[in-house]
Amino acid sequence: MTTKNIAIVYGGFSGERVISEKSAHLVQKHLDIEKYNSYLIDIDHHAWTAWFNGNSYPVSKDDFSVIIEGEKINFDGVFNAVHGTPGEDGKLQGYFDVINMPYNNCDVLSSAMSFNKLTCNLFLAGAGIKVAKSHLVRLGHEYDKKAIIKKLGLPCFVKPCDGGSSIGVTKVKKEEDFDEAIRYAQEEGVDALIESFLDGMEVSCGCININGQAKAVAVTEIVPANEFFDYESKYTADGTQEITPARLPKDRYDEVMRLTEVIYLYLNCKGMIRVDFMVCDDATYMIEPNTTPGLSDASILPQQAIYAGYDLETFFDISLSEMFVDHSKVDKN
């Protein structure tokens, strides 16, 4: 068996850099060393840097290669652990497509569409997926605060239209806090998306591609330490509970699993994703898909994988192995 050289890319240009680095290290820790030689590649604005045995080496953007101790390393594929831009919005995938480099997650279109919350919501709503009522405020454009609040009500959520890890998100309860929430969201992203408040149980469901088929992994109930599942509740606060399996009636649990697979297929996803939902009395609403989900020790998807009976070495190997298979040429009979 030939050992493949795998670049685990992390970092990026957003506030999710810290989480991305943790994800990359967890992935490297659990890759099968008999199948893969793994190299950590830090992607930032100033340089792309490979880390190997505690030393740093510049990465050539011409062919995505690196020279380590006089030997040129060419990569067979990429494990993308860049949360946020440019790894979750399609930019990095476009580069890899141009140089014909396989990668383990969603392609340019799927990534770009899912990363923009309004675009994703409109697309999936057309496919019958329920989403919260919303309103977009473009950066630099005027908006009618009273009309938006009349349309969506209070409380409401104001968030960057193109961000992750709940960075820049505010739960607005009073009209006088609305303008500051818009400013905060647009500082972290570009445009601000305002969404109506949904009262229910927040859950998250992972999904992975196995033999060309979408397979939901498990559903996790989220009980945040703070008022909502903000950045602090996700990564730093004590008291947040992530309960797998979610304490849902079987029919609602199965519904979330099914909806996750439907969303995976409609967005034409690849590799691993995670979809967040709000399970309310009247219906189940999608909050957002995450096409490059967190994979740190504190992240939900690794917990779900273990609950579902996978060890992480196998789980990550499934994601890597799939990118070397052309399912259009697989005999399905």
Image (cartoon, rainbow, N blue to C red):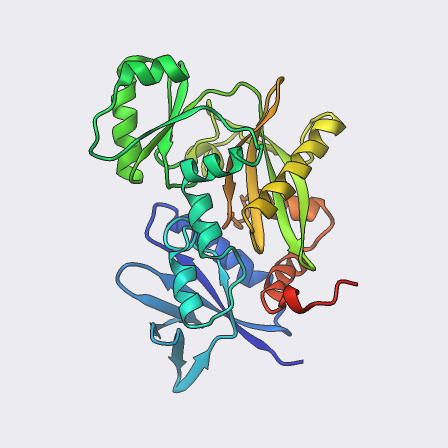
Q: Is residue 144 left or right of residue 200?
A: left
Which of 54/58 is in front? 58
Relative to 273, does residue 245 appear above or below in the rendering? above
Q: Give residue 328's position: percent from left, percent from top.
A: 64, 65
Q: Give residue 30's position: percent from left, percent from top.
A: 60, 61
Which residue occupies 40% across, 77% down? 65
Report which quarter residue 4 is drawn in: bottom right
Which residue occupies 52% across, 41% down? 289
Q: Is residue 303 left or right of residue 167?
A: right
Q: Give residue 279's position: percent from left, percent from top.
A: 60, 25
- Picture quarter with the N terminus: bottom right
Which of 160/57 is in front? 160
Which residue occupies 54% across, 61% down? 104
Q: Is residue 21 left or right of residue 252?
A: left
Q: Give residue 86's position: percent from left, percent from top.
A: 37, 54
The single residue placed furthest to the bottom in the displayed view is: 70
The single residue placed furthest to the front in the displayed view is: 126
Which residue occupies 33% across, 13% down? 174
Relative to 247, does residue 311 appear above or below in the rendering? below
Question: Can residue 291 be seen from the camera position used here?
Answer: yes
Relative to 197, does residue 243 appear above or below in the rendering? below
Question: Can residue 54 be seen from the camera position used here?
Answer: no
Which of 43/331 is in front? 331
Count up the numbered dots. Answer: 0
